[in-house]
Image: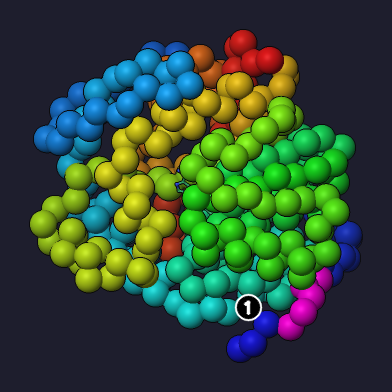
């Protein structure tokens, strides 16, 4: 299928019940003592100090067989050519003609679409505010916020293919005036302050078995966004440490999580260690798509945000 020049959002603002209910569901404070599940591992990573973050040795745990099966499933599913998809945000509201380029994470099959729906309804969080979408992939989260009332959105990703894909989607949805995309590692090319920072971060982190490593190496291009971060236990910590200086006073970080991935990348576990209060904004048992099981969307607020 070839891409046309424009995407469109079809609005039939009648039915907003189903997800509205979830978006407003019980914020539960999750901050507090959480057991350190990263204490036992077999590979030691020694990240450098960045932006005042404490230097800390983080251990990489072995992935469980179930996690490895899931990673292989995701990598296989991401061996796709460029395509167009209609992303359904609610019953009548659809992002039509959304471009997903080769090698970029397909949003419709992942937790991504749940986060996009959550943001679609929870626009009180970002209406007339400045937003940042870190690790933007196709740009879906930033694009939903721009369409649903954000004042301005900056999107960023470390992968050139994701940046190009986002640029194209911004153009297709005619958002050039209110959104722009930059390439960089986390906040490397970001300036200014934001009211909301969204990061749909890579969920799985751990030491792969020989078998999984072989599968990943022979399919490298397929799941590049998984491979690159799989053995980086530091990513979420760098993000949480650095995000604080880009967050306005009263600002919010939004991060989803696929619970199968366990504690090492779980914002509810790692957020409090960086001084954040963590609220579960949304929780669902997902029964379709590639990431089946319990998925959460968290809101994080820093006790000392600027
Ligand atoms: C799980 S995908 C999410 C994509 C998109 N936000 C979505 O919701 O569909 C994670 C994205 O983070 C990006 N990423 C990984 N490490 C990064 C880093 N250090 N800095 C910026 N982006 C990164 C990947 O390239 C990938 O596009």
Observer able to see residue 190: yes
Quarter of the figure that contains the C terminus: top right
Residue nearer the viewer, 254 or 167:
167
Q: Secondary structure at mark 1?
A: strand
State the residue lying farthest toward the bottom: 1
Query: Disc 1 marks which residue?
Result: 84
Residue nearer the viewer, 289 or 256:
256
Classify 254 as above or below 49.
Answer: below
Magenta segment, prevailing SS (helix, strand or loop): loop
Residue 224 location (% of width, % of height): 37, 61
Examine the image and state in which quarter residue 2 appears.
bottom right
Residue 220 location (% of width, % of height): 30, 66
Q: Residue at x 45, y 77 (%)?
A: 80
Residue 78 location (% of width, % of height): 42, 70
Classify 208 as above or below 55.
Answer: below
- Say whether residue 43 is left or right of residue 169: left
Q: Residue at x 20, y 24 (%)?
A: 39
Examine the image and state in which quarter residue 193 appears.
top right
In this picture, which residue range is highlighted in magenta?
A: 4-8
- Say whether residue 260 is left or right of residue 140: left
Quarter of the figure that contains the N terminus: bottom right
- Note whether ligand 1 is within 8 Å of mark 1: no
Classify 295 as above or below 196.
Answer: below
Examine the image and state in which quarter residue 299 appears.
top right
Q: Find out whether residue 14 is within the magenta segment.
A: no
Total count of labels = 1
């Amino acid at each position: 299928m070839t891409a046309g020049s424009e995407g469109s959002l079809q609005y039939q603002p009648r039915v907003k019940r189903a997800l509205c209910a979830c978006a407003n569901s019980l914020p539960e404070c999750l901050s507090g003592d959480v057991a350190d599940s990263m204490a036992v591992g077999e590979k030691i990573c020694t990240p450098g100090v960045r932006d005042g973050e404490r230097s800390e040795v983080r251990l990489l745990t072995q992935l469980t067989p179930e996690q490895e099966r899931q990673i292989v499933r995701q990598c296989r599913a991401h061996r796709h050519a460029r395509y167009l998809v209609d992303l359904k945000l609610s019953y009548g509201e659809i992002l039509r003609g959304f471009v997903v380029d080769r090698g970029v994470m397909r949003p419709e099959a992942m937790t991504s679409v749940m986060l996009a729906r959550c943001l679609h309804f929870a626009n009180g969080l970002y209406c007339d505010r400045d937003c940042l979408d870190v690790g933007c992939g196709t740009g879906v989260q930033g694009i939903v916020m721009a369409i649903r009332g954000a004042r301005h959105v900056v999107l960023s990703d470390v992968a050139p293919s994701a940046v190009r894909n986002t640029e194209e989607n911004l153009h297709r949805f005619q958002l050039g005036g209110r959104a722009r995309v930059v390439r960089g590692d986390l906040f490397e090319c970001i300036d200014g302050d934001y009211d909301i920072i969204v990061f749909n971060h890579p969920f799985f982190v751990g030491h792969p078995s020989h078998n999984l490593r072989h599968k990943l190496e022979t399919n490298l291009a397929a799941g590049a966004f998984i491979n690159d971060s799989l053995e980086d236990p530091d990513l979420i910590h760098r993000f949480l440490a650095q995000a604080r200086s880009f967050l306005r006073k009263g600002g919010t970080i939004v991060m989803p999580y696929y619970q199968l991935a366990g504690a090492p990348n779980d914002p509810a576990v790692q957020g409090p260690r960086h001084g954040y209060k963590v609220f579960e904004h949304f929780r669902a048992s997902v029964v379709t798509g590639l990431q089946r099981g319990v998925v959460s969307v968290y809101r994080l607020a820093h006790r000392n945000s600027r």
